[in-house]
Image (cartoon, rainbow, N blue to C red):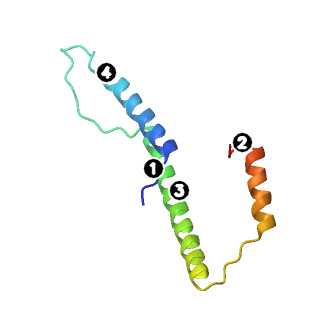
Amino acid sequence: MKVNRPEIISLVNKIMKQDQVRGKNNTQASPSVPRVDRVEISAGSEILKKEMSRLDEIDASQAEKLSELASRIEAGEYKVDAQELADTILQAIEQGRIS
């Protein structure tokens, strides 16, 4: 199953853009200064790491909920409350989530 996560894509693009800008600035150093290799972990990569672990937790909990729902449907135990469904749809329309 492919999941589209635009917030992660934009975060990765932002970090890559910052790294590219830093890389361009570092190439303008004078040739007489010896270059030294170093490893630098940006704050952006730490944020990305935290967000990825948070999404893994969310995905695991969603997978568990979906599994439980699927077994209830297969067992014929899942019933839809039509009034609650209608209320939820109307709220989504009012909030602009559904057009």
Q: Tell me the distance, in whole angstroms, between the alpha carbons under discs 1 and 3.
A: 9 Å
Give the class, few, some or many, for how many residues have Cα within 10 Å of label 1's Cα (few <14, many ≥20).
Answer: few
Q: Position of residue 29 (x, y in %)?
A: 27, 16
The image quadrant of residue 42 is top left
Q: Which one is in front, 38 or 51?
A: 51
Query: Residue 66: x percent and y percent?
Result: 56, 71
**Mark 4 or mark 1, earlier in chain:** 4
Q: CA distance from mark 1 to mark 2?
A: 32 Å
Residue at 49% x, 48% y is 5
Q: Nearer the viewer, mark 2 or mark 4?
A: 2
Q: Are marks 2 and 4 in contact (CB under 8 Å)?
A: no
* Callout in the foreground (2, 3): 2
Element carrying mark 1: helix
Residue 99: where, in percent of width, then height? 68, 43
Instruction: Kindly identify the amino acid type of the residue bearing the numbered disc 3.
Output: Arg
The residue that disc 2 covers is 96
- In this view, the residue in front, 42 or 99, is 99
Place of residue 33 in the rendered image (x, y in percent of width and height, measured from the top left): 21, 18
Q: Quadrant of residue 14?
A: top left
In the displayed structure, 20 sits above or below 88; it is above
Give the residue pinned by disc 3. Answer: 54
Tag on residue 24? Answer: 4
Q: Amino acid at mark 1?
A: Lys
Spatial CA span between label 3 and label 4: 32 Å
